[in-house]
């Protein structure tokens, strides 16, 4: 099994180009375009832009380097489908092959982009330390009926 990442840059969202302007595909395409419409998306974009600034590279290169790293640690094949419209965009994407993110940067990107899995996952995950012999404070004594 494998997975294909369609639009790994979120239709341009992770490049930061739509942060302060809306012209271009946001107004003319008339289709679903990813926008910065949630706090989490803003946090992810802020993190990508900050790391790009730290490394002196582009946000697109950071996003693609991040996906490439995730593909190396995944248990299934992960293939990002890039869609450059210009030679300049293709050059930017290919330059991501030379971007090296630190362990801390990967960790930050993973944390801010984590999607809540909901129930029952979160309930089980909260009890995992106890189930693995962790803190006894999480144990609930069984209720014993009294006649």
Image (cartoon, rainbow, N blue to C red):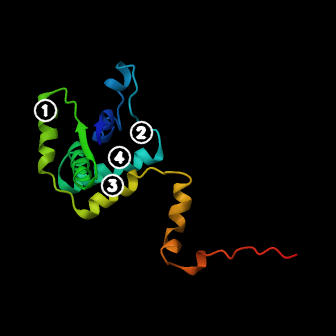
Q: CA distance from mark 3 to mark 1?
A: 25 Å
Contact (CB < 8 A) between labels 2 and 1? Answer: no
Horizontal side of 34 relative to 50 (left or right) equals right
Q: Position of residue 98 (x, y in %)?
A: 11, 50
* First reached walking from the N terminus: tag 3 or tag 2: 2
Q: In the drawing, does residue 66 fall left or right of residue 91?
A: right
What's the residue at 35%, 55% (across, down)? 110
Q: Residue at x 16, y 56 (%)?
A: 100
The C terminus - image quarter: bottom right
Mark 2 or 4, nearer chain start: 2
- Which disc is residue 45 wearing? 4
SS category of the residue bearing label 2: loop
Q: Is residue 59 visible?
A: yes
Label 1: how many Cα within 10 Å (few below 14, some 14–19, many 20+): few
Label 3 Cα neighbours within 10 Å, binned few <14 / some 14-19 / many ≥20: some
| Residue 36 circle label | 2
Q: How far apart are the alpha carbons under marks 3 and 2?
A: 16 Å
In the image, farthest residue toward the front: 147
Task: Name which quarter of the figure residue 23 lies in.
Answer: top left
Q: Which residue is mark 1?
A: 88
- Mark 3 lies on residue: 109
Percent position of residue 47, x then y: 33, 53
Check contact, mark 2 vs mark 4: CB within 8 A.
yes
Residue at the location (16% across, 39% down)? 93
**Which of the two discs, 3 and 2, sits closer to the camera?**
3
- Up-down: is 4 above or below 56? above
- Residue 126 is marked as none
Marks 3 & 4, CB-CB < 8 Å contact: no
């Amino acid at each position: 099994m494998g997975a294909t990442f369609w639009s790994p840059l979120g239709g341009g969202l992770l490049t930061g180009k739509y942060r302060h302007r809306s012209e271009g595909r946001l107004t003319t395409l008339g289709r679903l375009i990813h926008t910065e419409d949630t706090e989490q998306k803003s946090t992810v974009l802020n993190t990508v832009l900050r790391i790009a600034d730290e490394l002196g590279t582009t946000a697109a290169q950071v996003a693609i380097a991040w996906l490439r790293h995730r593909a190396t640690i995944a248990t299934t094949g992960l293939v990002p489908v890039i869609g450059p419209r210009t030679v300049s965009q293709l050059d930017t994407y290919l330059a991501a092959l030379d971007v090296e993110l630190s362990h801390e940067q990967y960790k930050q990107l993973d944390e801010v982009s984590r999607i809540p899995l909901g129930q029952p996952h979160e309930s089980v995950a909260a009890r995992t330390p106890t189930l693995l012999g962790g803190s006894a404070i999480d144990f609930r004594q069984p209720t014993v009926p009294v006649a």
